Amino acid sequence: MSSFKDRENAFENKFAHDQELQFRATARRNKLFGLWAAELMGLTGDAAEAYVAEVIRSDLNEPGDEDVFRKVLGDLQAKQVDLSEHQIRRRFEECMAEAMKQIQDAS
């Protein structure tokens, strides 16, 4: 019985660890994505940091990632940045890959 309980605890610990890594990676992705968008819109210094904070907060609007993507997409379109939705989505995905790599490298 102890062996089963040990396996159960190990599984639960791994699940919790994986969820924490996913949360950290998503937060890092949002920051990287916000910094990228801020640069495209010509924001620097405090204005760029304030924009990144807005992007991070936008992730609280609804479950999933689309709230962040829509916010940045809308902001880039409003500033008439010449990128397609596909290019912006690809960068969004690249930011997630980079965030995962940074989190794993730090562990």
Image (cartoon, helix red, strand yellow):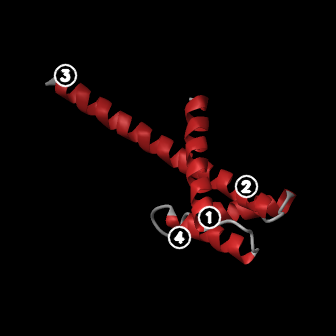
Q: Secondary structure at mark 1?
A: helix
Lower sequence index among marks 4 and 2: 2
What residue is at 32 percent from the left and 37 percent from the top? 12
Q: Residue furthest top?
A: 3
Q: Which kind of residue does numbered mark 3 sit on?
A: Ser
- The residue labelled by disc 1 is 57
Residue 30 placement, left or right of 44: left
Q: Which of the labelled discs sits on residue 35, or is there none?
A: 2
Secondary element under disc 2, as helix, strand or loop, is: helix
Residues at marks 4 and 2, CA–CA distance in whole angstroms? 20 Å
Q: Is residue 105 left or right of residue 52?
A: left
Task: Determine the residue positioned at 55% across, 40% down.
Answer: 100
Identify the element where label 4 is drawn. loop
Amino acid type shown at disc 1: Arg
- Quadrant containing the C terminus is top right
Q: Nearer the viewer, mark 1 or mark 3?
A: 1
User: Residue, x 75% and y 74% (percent of image)?
Assistant: 80
Is the residue marked by circle 3 packed among few (<14), some (14-19), or many (20+) residues within 10 Å? few
User: Camera-side residue: 83 or 22?
Assistant: 83
Three-letter amino acid code at disc 2?
Answer: Leu
The residue to which callout 3 is attached is 3
How far apart are labels 3 and 2 at the CA level? 48 Å
Residue furthest to the right in view is 45
Disc assigned to residue 61: 4
* Mark 1 in CB contact with mark 4 (< 8 angstroms): no
Tell me the distance, in whole angstroms, between the alpha carbons under discs 1 and 2.
14 Å
The answer to which of marks 1 and 2 sits earlier in the sequence is 2
Instruction: Give the secondary structure at mark 3.
Output: helix
Q: Which-is-in-front pick, marks 3 and 2? A: 2
